Image (cartoon, rainbow, N blue to C red):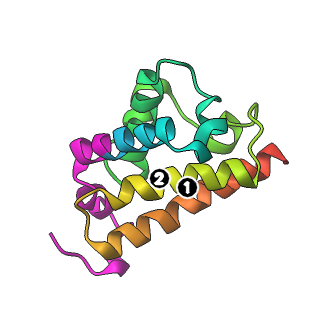
Amino acid sequence: MSFRSCEYGVGDNSYRMAGELSGITALVNEFYNNMEVFPESKKIRDMHSNDLAESRKKLTYFLSGWLGGPKLYSENYGSINIPSAHRHLSVGVEESDAWLFCMKKAIAKQPYEEPFKLYLIEQLRVPAERIRNVSGT
């Protein structure tokens, strides 16, 4: 499937480019696997419970809707305000960068077209920055 970059974010194009729910699940699993192995991510890994099953599910469901697919997060958990949901955490530049690092590594391993990989990481910088701003660190 090929799209021009200007079509990402339109309708369900990004959701389809990400491989729909199975592709997003693979991305999220790789992301959390990265969080387990890279020393740069220790602080953000420690912000999560030992069992990552619920975190994996929530991020998968969130990304599904965020990328233009089914709104699984709101269907299962209700509405979410990403910055407010993370307000209780101490997220500074280091933590935000570690999150993006793990996500960038996860995206790199996906079978996405290169322009979509670049688009996706740039889009993910927005909520990462909003979370950091709300945390105030």
Q: Around disc 1, counting alpha carbons within 10 Å, would you say few (fewer than 14), some (14 to 19), or many (20 or more)?
A: many
Q: Quadrant of the N terminus?
A: bottom left
Magenta span includes 111: no
In 3D space, how far apart are the residues under numbered discs 1 and 2 (Cα atoms)? 5 Å
Image height check: is 43 above or below 110?
A: above
* Image point (25%, 42%), residue name: 21
* Image point (69%, 54%), residue name: 130
Which is nearer the eye, 135 or 77?
135
Q: Which amino acid, by three-letter code, is at mark 2?
A: Met
Estimate the x, y position of residue 98 in percent, counting from the top left.
61, 50
Q: Which mark is residue 103?
A: 2
Q: Which residues are magenta?
A: 1-26
Which residue position holds label 1?
A: 100
Q: Which amino acid, by three-letter code, is at mark 1?
A: Leu
Dots 1 and 2: beta carbons under 8 Å?
yes
- Residue farthest toward the left in the current orientation of the protein: 1
Estimate the x, y position of residue 87 in percent, counting from the top left.
75, 36
Image height check: is 8 above or below 136?
A: below
Which is nearer the eye, 105 or 84?
105
Q: Around disc 2, counting alpha carbons within 10 Å, would you say few (fewer than 14), some (14 to 19), or many (20 or more)?
A: many
